[in-house]
Image (spheres, rainbow, N blue to C red):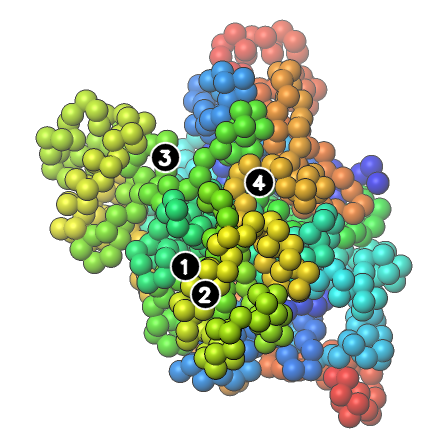
Amino acid sequence: MAKALPLQNIRVANFGWVWAGPVVGQTLSYLGAEVYKIESHARVDMNRMLPAFAGGVRHPDRSLTNHAGWAGNGSVSLNLKKPEGRALAEQLVALCDVVVENFSPGAMDEMGLGYERLRTIKPDIVMLSMPAAGLTGPLRTVRTYGMSLTSLTGLDSLTGYFDGPPIPCENALADPLNGILGAFAILAALNYRDRTGKGQLIDYSQHEAMMQLVGPAFMDYAFNGRVAVPIGNRHPLGVAAPHGVFPCAGDDRWISIAVMTEAEWLRLVHAMGDPEWAQAPEFSCAAGRVRHIDTLHTRLAEWTRTVNDYELAHTLQRHGIAAAPVLNVADLYNDPHYRARGTFIEVQHPLGFRETIYGAYVKTSRTEAKVSPGPAIGQDNDHVFKQLLGLSEERYQELIAQQIIY
Amino acid sequence: MQGALEGIRVIELGQLVSAAYCAKLFADYGADVIKIEPPDGDLARQWGPFPNDQPDREKSGLYFFLNTNKRAVTLDITQPRGRALLLELIRDADILVENNHPAQMRAWGLDYVSLAQLNPNLVMISITPFGQSGPYSEWHGYDLNAWHFSGCSARYCGRPGEAPLEQGTFIADFYGAIAGAAWGFGATYGRRLAGGGQQVDVSCAEVAAAVFVGCGNIGGYAQDRKFDSRTGVGMSAGAPATILPCKDGHVWVMALEPGQWNGLRHVMGDPEWMQLEMFQDMAVRAQNQDMMYPLIEQWTMEHTKLEIQEKCQAAGCPVTAVFTVAEAAEHPHLRERQYIQEIAHPVLGNVRDLGAPFKLLACPGGPQRPAPLLGQHNDEVYGTVLRMRADERQQLRADRII
């Protein structure tokens, strides 16, 4: 393992809020960047109050959800409502390559920390602005949560049981994905900066980024004017069957099975012990199976219903069929595959307790991500204000007393 | 205008969605992406959607969406001379994006260890449902299997007692593709510091299991050995946070913070029940949601989704319409931002396509050139990039290698 991580000379000031912004910082940090989240006791981020809490103690430095989602970010605490706080933020930005924010459009400008201002301090700064619907356009001020943002993209209209009403995804699917794609946007802009000497502002609309997921259904609309409906677990383009989730033995146990080719169908029939129903002519080709998908799925469910999901997945995999158990949260934690890959790891929080977060969610063969849990508020104040910005101990204490470093 | 990734060469060796979308992110921002297809083409060419549902390998909407701005060549890499040509392309590339089964890559002699000997600076982005290591790395899987293995569906989507749901698109593939692009380009950008290239091992299931489901659930489970599952309704910690039917479709009704709730009260004419003490806190409202949602629904059913969105937004309440794909695509916001673009294609004519996922204001990016025809760039790539003579190319064609 080489010691140097790919982004080790990149420094990031992360004004990101809640979930999407912090995952940008996390991704860059796992690749080696030095990332400081700028936050304050004057307005504690609601993400810090999400359960569960370490030891069951409700406190902004003990949210286990927060420590996973913000892992990799450092933290400095600055009260940006005060001019001296904003001045210190500017001094930090002058030493950074990248600024990240996901406030509503204009919020950074109102604080005097908009792109036009920051580029006078650091001309080649790369600034990622990722509001809900971008920096321009009639929806730019739309209020949404990550959970409902996808409703504006058409994605939510595709989610639900076949031809039924839309069923909500009960958490913000968009947030972490926007965080990761936001990191890619920054890397692209850094590449441009290194070649041309120029920084830039990135107008990242979470709405447009997530609408990419609707691409396949959008093309059917563009070509044929067809408006997609919820499709359950069916194939998004309706080309394969069986393609679904089937009940297994036990409470809320399920298996996913997807058959894409004739060879896979024949192997599935064989794995089921060549039942007579599977020989019916309507199941002999993909088009027929898709046409009779309800009957096919009912038949298959009768077969899976009494079997253990993991055992059945192993059996079907031995036959070369794409099948896997449907995991719940406990399964994620206990599954041997995720254990072997170190997907979830126990770490020491700077405040002294042990906790479990996710580790590097992508594996790299040469460099190893340094994973540290989400920060205690202001944990990097000493380093940033005294070492990086060169404040004297006296001035530093004064700013703390004035609740500017706060 | 120069793209942000100008000068980066990406070789794409894969089928369907994950590798293609990952490589598209590079192509959208100016990288030179050369897509390698088997002689009969990427399977996405067979999947549609097709205009008038008439299958034609040059008319697949899925293929179009995933492959704009790329050059495409055909190559039979199962033949030794085909494989040798692929290795020549990889030798001078910055990035290889692939989504083949690990055993298949080994069988082709295209595992990372072999390729790193050829090109030590290569970043190899491997995107598969389960990843390159771990007991299920040899499993066979598709997008559906990866998503349900990530915990997302059992935890967050579907009614209790009924099947957990996927999102209605290739969501696990998109998760893997985007993670592969970010980590893969990070590894490329910092190659000199890191001392060379590397393999970037993306499991689509793992990315979603970690950043989406793991984030809010795994710490609590590890500590308390308790976990939550889907409710089929919406958020369980606060209410209202659900999808309700309205006069012409559905709306996402969200009113959590006091200001938002008061905004909703105002828009709904502050009926008596909304003034009751039991409805003034989002957590208490969540406990009483079975009583509350039908009352809100009576009101939503009298109004259209756009009326509801406009009135609630104006009152500071984050309610949004559940747009159909058509409503989403035709929204004036996207028109003003020029998100939807028309691109001319030699067989399909003018095609409306989704634009850049994000705008780099100095060098915007986004699709400009249509998805390639099968083997469209064979002469260009084999002639100009690999400097083969016309007669050599003719021979390869005769031997069905390209």
Q: Residue at x 69, y 52 (%)?
A: B136
State how far apart marks 4 and 1 are (Cα): 23 Å
Query: Where, by quadrant of the figure, is residue B232 drawn?
Result: top left
Q: Disc 1 designates what residue?
A: A232
Tell which subunit mark 3 falls on: B
Asked whether residue A66 is in view, the answer is no
Query: In the image, what residue occupies the spot 49% across and 25% down?
Result: A52
Three-letter code, disc 1? Gly
Q: Quadrant of the C terminus of chain B?
A: bottom right
Report the Cα–Cα distance between label 4 and label 2: 27 Å
Q: Say few, some or many: other residues with alpha carbon within 10 Å of mark 2 (under 14 / 14 to 19 / 20 or more).
A: few
Residue placed most toward the observer, A219 or B346: A219
Tell me the residue that label 4 is attached to.
A331
Alpha-carbon span between mark 3 and mark 1 = 22 Å
Report the disc number at residue A299: 2
Sequence-first disc among 2 and 1:
1
Q: Position of residue B279 (x, y in %)?
A: 22, 27
Q: Are marks 3 and 2 on the same chain?
A: no
Chain to which the residue tagged by mark 2 belongs: A
| Whether label 4 touches label 3, CB < 8 Å | no
Q: Cα distance, mark 4 to mark 3?
A: 21 Å
Residue at 62% across, 17% down: A353
Residue at the spot of label 3: B236
B313 sits to left or right of A219: left
